[in-house]
Image (tube, helix red, strand yellow):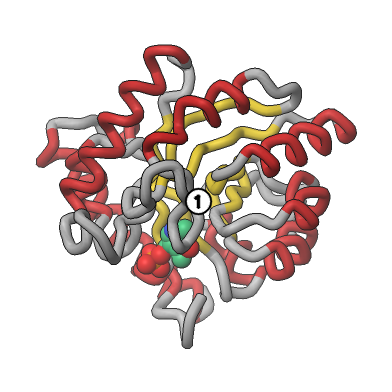
Amino acid sequence: MTDRKQEIAANLAGVEERIAAACEAAGRRRDDVTLIVVTKTYPADDVRILSGLGVRHVAENRDQDAAPKAAVCSDLPLSWHFVGQLQTNKVRSVVGYADVVQSIDRARLVTALSKEAVRTGREVGCLLQVALDAGEGGRGGRGGVSPAGIEELADLVAGSEGLRLDGLMTVAPLTGAYAGRQRAAFERIMDLSTCVRRTHPAANMVSAGMSADLEQAVAAGATHVRVGSAVLGVRPGLG
Ligand SMILES: *Cc1c(COP(=O)(O)O)cnc(C)c1O
C-alpha cells in the first residue's frame, strides 16, 4: 500500500467506527446510514483509492473540479453527489455525471435540471437543500430553501420529468436560532422530512452531518452523512 492509501484507509476506518458507534448508541442499524465521502479539493487519485477501499458514494461542490474528476473516474462503481450551490449555466455539465444533486433550492434550477435530464435521457435524484437560518420565503446565505418553501419546491421536483425527489439535505447553520445547536438543527430537518414524506413517501433520504457533527446527525435519524476532512485530511484554505 502507498502511504496515501494507508492514510486514507486509517481515516476511513476511524470514520466507520464513529458511524457504527453512533448507530449503536441510537439503536439504529449500521445499514441505515450511508457514508458519502466529500472529495472536493482532493485529486482523482484519492477518489480511485477510496473506490478501492469500498467507498461507493462521493460528493463534490464545484463543477469545474468535479467534471474532470468524474470523467477520469468513470470506470469506477461510484455514485456522484453534487452538494454545492449550482448555477443554471452549469446544469448541463453536472447532469453529465451527477447521480444525485443535493443542493436544489429554487424553481429555476429544477426547470433547468429537468430539461437537461430529459434531453440526455438520465434520471437525476434530487434533495432539497434546506436553510434552517433562512428568513421566511427567502434563501440561506450558503444557498438552501427556507422551511416554508419546501412543500412547493418538493411538488415541483416530483412533477418534473427526468427528476426523482429523494429527500432533504442540510448543513448545520452557523448563524440564527440553530447556531451551535447541531442536534436541534438535525431534529428539525427530520421533522421537515416527515412532512415531505406525507405527500412523497419515497423521498426518504435525509443528508445531514459532516466530519464535526456526524454523531448528532445519526442520532437525529439522518440516512446519509457527508464526510470530507475526517477521511481525506483538512483542506488548505476554504473549500
Ligand atoms: C465540504 C462539505 C462537506 C464535508 O465537510 P467536512 O467538514 O470536510 O466533513 C459536507 N457537506 C457539504 C455541503 C460540503 O460542502
Residue at 45% of width from left, 62% of height from top?
A: 141
Residue at 70% of width from left, 57% of height from top?
A: 87
In depth, the one of 83 and 77 nearer the eye is 83
Residue at 27% of width from left, 54% of height from top?
A: 214
Q: Position of residue 58 (x, y in %)?
A: 55, 53
User: Does residue 87 appear left or right of residue 230 in this picture?
Assistant: right
Residue 9 makes an appearance in the image: no
Residue 41 makes an appearance in the image: yes
Give the residue furthest to the left.
25
In depth, the one of 42 and 156 nearer the eye is 156
Q: Position of residue 84 (x, y in %)?
A: 57, 58
Specify few, some or many for label 1: CA neighbours under 10 Å numbering under 14, 14-19, or 20 or more. some
Q: Which residue is mark 1?
A: 55
- Mark 1, secondary structure of its residue: loop
In the rendered view, would you say 224 is above or below 14? Answer: above
In the rendered view, would you say 142 is above or below 208? Answer: below
